[in-house]
Image: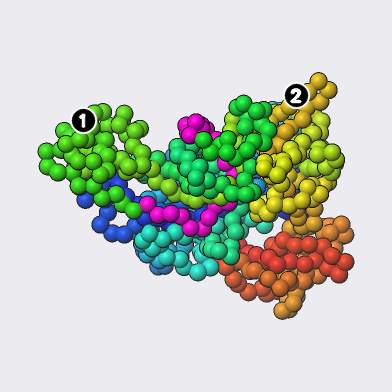
C-alpha cells in the first residue's frame, strides 16, 4: 500500500451562519458602511484532518491563501478568508477540528460552491532523527490550476437571516496523493466531500482554546472568547458552552491534572482563566441580533474619541469619552462602543454552541501514536509518533484516570465523539491523548484527560486502480499496489455496500472541480476506502477521478 496511498487527511470546513451587527471603527467610513441594510449572516470554517501515515510523513503543511463562497451561477462571491496565508500541519488535526475563520456580513441567498485556493502543499518525509526535522526531505507536489479547488455541495444551501447552517468539507488525501510510477515524487489529485450538517449528521469533535468570560452556574453554561478567528471584523468572537452529565473537568493549576467536580469550574473565580475545551459543536447557533442604540445629538464623542455606551442607561448618565483602543477592550454584554458616527463595536458575538466533553485548566500535553499493549490496571503503553514537543525513546505509559459517581474521569471516545469502552484501546489501534506528565522515580506516566481512539484503523485500507468491469453490486479493478489485503493481485474483486457514496473529481490545467455523484465505467481511475474479507474487498466509498491535464 505504501506505493500508492501514503496518508489520509481531512479538512472540515463548517459554515455557521448567524445574524450580525456592528461594523468598523475606521474614521473614513460613512454611516452606510457601519451597518448593512441587507439581511446578513456569519459564515464560519472549521478545519480537520483524517488519519495519515505517520511512518512516512512527519508533517503535511497546507498553505491556504483564500476561501470564497460562490452563488448558484458563480456570479455572487463572498470572501471568507484572504490576506496573509495560513499554513497548518494537517497531521495535528486528524482527531478533531479547530476554528479556522469566521466572517460576518454574508448576505442572505443561495450558495452552491466553495472555492479553496492553496498556495502550497509541503510533504515532510520522516527520517531517522525525529528530534530534528531541519534536515528532513520535503516534497511539494504540483497543484492543478495554481491550487484552485472548486467544491460543489450535494445540494445548494441557503444563508438565511437569523439562521444557522453548517457545512463539512472532507478532503481525503489517501486518494489525493499518489506516488508516481517512477517513484520520483508525488501527484496531487484532490478528493473532497461536502456535507451540510443537520440533526442526522455529526461532525467531529471541536477543539477551542480561549478565555472564560462568563459563567452561569445555575444553567451550567459558560462563555469562552478569543478561540475563533474572525475575518474583517472588530468583535470578540466567543462560543456558548454547555456542561452536561458526560462533561469532565481536569485541573492542572492546583491539582496536577486530576479530574475535579464540575462545580469547582462553574465558579466566578474562573472568569478570566485560559482553558482548552473539546466538545460537540451544535449545528444550530444562538443568533446575535444587531444592537439597536439611539445616541441623541450632543452625546456623540468628538472625532478621534469613543464612548463606552451602556444599553438602557439615560444619555446623561453615560461615561465620558476616552481613548478608542482602551475602551474597545472593555466592551462586553450590555455595552457598545460609539464614535462620532455611531455604534462601531457591539457586545461579544457568540459564533458557536458547543456541548463540552473535556475542560482542561492549565497546560496539557497532546501526544499521538500506536497502542502497543492493552489497558491493564488502568494503564496502557503507547509508541508515540515523533515530531512533537517531547521525544520519547521508549513506549510511554498512559494512565486512565478513574472517576466516581460525582466526578467523570478520563473521557474515552471514538473519532466521531462516541463514548466507548476502555477495552477498545488495544494494539495496533492509533490514539490521540491529552494529559499531564507525571515524572516518577522509576517511570514517566502521562495522566490522561482525553483519549480519542481510531477504532477502525486496523481494518480499513485505501486502494486506487483502473476499473476492469462494473456491475450494480460491484466491480473489478486493476490496483496500482502490488499487494492488497496481504495478497498479490492484479484483479481485485470489489463489492459495494448498501450505503455507497460516489464522488467525481475532474482535474484540468485551470483547476479542479469536485462534486457528489458520478458514473463508474471501465477504464476509469477510481479510489476506494474499504475492508478486506474472505470473499473480496467491501466499500461504501468510491471516488471517480478524471485527470485531463496534458
* Residue 276 is one of the magenta-drawn residues: yes
Along the line of sight, the residue nearer the viewer: 459 or 413: 413
Seen at 47% across and 60% down, the residue is 165
Left or right: where does residue 439 sit relative to residue 256? right
Q: Which residue is mark 2?
A: 439
* One can see residue 513 in this view: no
Query: What numbered label is drawn on residue 70?
Result: none
**C-alpha span from label 2 to label 1:** 55 Å
Q: Position of residue 326 (x, y in %)?
A: 31, 29
Along the line of sight, the residue nearer the viewer: 200 or 537: 200
Left or right: where does residue 85 sit relative to residue 364? left
Seen at 74% across and 39% down, the residue is 402
Q: Which of the image's four quarters has the C terminus?
A: bottom right
Query: What numbered label is drawn on residue 320?
Result: 1
Q: Secondary structure at mark 1?
A: loop
The magenta stretch is 268-288
Within 10 angstroms of label 2, few (less than 14), some, or many (20 or more) residues? few
Amino acid at each position: 500500500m505504501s506505493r500508492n496511498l501514503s496518508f489520509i487527511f481531512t479538512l472540515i470546513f463548517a459554515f455557521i451562519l448567524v445574524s450580525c451587527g456592528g461594523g468598523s471603527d475606521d474614521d473614513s467610513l460613512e454611516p452606510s458602511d457601519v451597518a448593512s441594510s441587507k439581511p446578513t449572516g456569519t459564515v464560519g470554517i472549521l478545519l480537520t484532518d483524517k488519519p495519515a501515515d505517520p511512518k512516512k510523513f512527519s508533517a503535511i503543511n497546507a498553505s491556504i491563501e483564500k476561501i470564497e463562497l460562490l452563488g448558484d451561477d458563480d456570479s455572487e462571491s463572498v470572501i471568507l478568508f484572504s490576506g496573509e496565508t495560513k499554513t497548518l500541519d494537517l497531521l495535528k488535526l486528524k482527531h478533531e477540528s479547530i476554528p479556522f475563520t469566521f466572517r460576518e456580513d454574508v448576505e442572505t441567498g443561495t450558495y452552491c460552491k466553495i472555492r479553496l485556493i492553496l498556495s502550497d502543499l509541503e510533504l515532510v518525509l520522516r527520517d531517522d532523527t525525529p528530534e530534528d526535522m531541519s534536515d528532513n526531505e520535503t516534497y511539494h507536489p504540483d497543484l492543478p490550476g495554481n491550487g484552485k479547488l472548486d467544491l460543489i455541495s450535494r445540494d445548494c444551501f441557503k444563508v438565511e437571516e437569523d439562521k444557522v447552517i453548517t457545512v463539512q468539507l472532507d478532503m481525503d488525501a489517501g486518494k489525493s496523493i499518489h506516488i508516481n510510477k517512477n517513484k520520483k515524487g508525488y501527484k496531487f489529485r484532490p478528493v473532497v466531500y461536502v456535507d451540510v450538517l443537520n440533526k442526522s449528521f455529526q461532525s467531529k469533535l471541536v477543539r477551542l482554546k480561549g478565555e472564560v468570560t462568563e459563567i452561569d452556574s445555575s444553567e451550567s453554561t459558560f462563555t469562552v472568547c478569543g478561540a475563533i478567528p474572525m475575518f474583517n471584523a472588530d468583535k470578540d468572537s466567543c462560543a456558548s458552552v454547555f456542561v452536561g452529565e458526560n462533561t469532565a473537568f481536569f485541573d492542572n493549576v492546583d491539582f496536577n491534572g486530576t479530574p475535579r467536580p464540575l462545580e469547582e469550574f462553574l465558579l466566578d473565580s474562573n472568569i478570566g482563566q485560559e482553558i482548552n475545551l473539546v466538545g460537540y459543536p451544535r449545528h444550530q447557533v444562538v443568533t446575535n441580533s444587531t444592537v439597536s442604540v439611539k445616541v441623541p445629538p450632543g452625546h456623540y464623542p468628538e472625532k478621534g474619541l469613543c464612548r463606552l455606551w451602556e444599553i438602557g442607561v439615560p444619555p446623561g448618565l453615560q461615561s465620558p469619552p476616552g481613548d478608542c483602543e482602551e475602551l474597545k477592550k472593555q466592551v462586553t454584554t450590555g455595552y457598545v462602543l460609539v464614535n462620532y458616527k455611531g455604534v462601531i463595536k457591539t457586545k461579544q458575538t457568540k459564533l458557536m454552541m458547543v456541548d463540552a466533553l473535556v475542560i482542561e485548566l492549565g497546560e496539557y500535553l497532546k501526544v499521538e501514536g500506536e497502542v502497543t499493549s492493552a489497558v491493564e490496571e488502568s494503564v496502557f503503553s503507547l509508541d508515540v509518533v515523533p515530531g512533537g514537543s517531547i521525544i520519547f525513546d521508549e513506549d510511554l505509559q498512559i494512565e486512565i484516570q478513574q472517576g466516581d459517581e460525582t466526578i467523570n474521569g478520563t473521557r474515552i471516545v471514538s473519532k466521531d465523539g462516541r463514548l466507548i469502552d476502555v477495552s477498545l484501546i488495544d494494539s495496533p489501534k492509533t490514539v490521540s491523548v491529552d494529559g499531564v506528565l507525571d515524572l516518577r522515580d522509576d517511570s514517566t506516566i502521562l495522566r490522561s484527560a482525553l483519549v480519542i481512539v481510531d477504532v477502525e484503523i486496523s481494518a480499513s485500507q485505501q486502494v486506487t486502480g483502473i476499473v476492469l468491469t462494473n456491475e450494480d453490486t460491484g466491480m473489478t479493478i486493476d490496483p496500482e499496489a502490488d499487494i492488497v489485503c496481504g495478497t498479490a493481485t492484479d484483479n481485485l474483486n470489489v463489492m459495494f455496500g448498501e450505503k455507497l457514496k460516489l464522488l467525481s473529481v475532474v482535474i484540468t490545467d485551470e483547476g479542479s472541480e469536485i462534486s457528489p455523484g458520478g458514473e463508474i465505467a471501465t477504464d476509469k481511475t477510481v479510489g476506494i476506502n474499504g475492508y478486506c474479507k474472505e470473499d473480496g474487498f467491501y466499500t461504501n466509498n468510491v471516488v471517480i477521478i478524471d485527470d485531463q491535464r496534458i
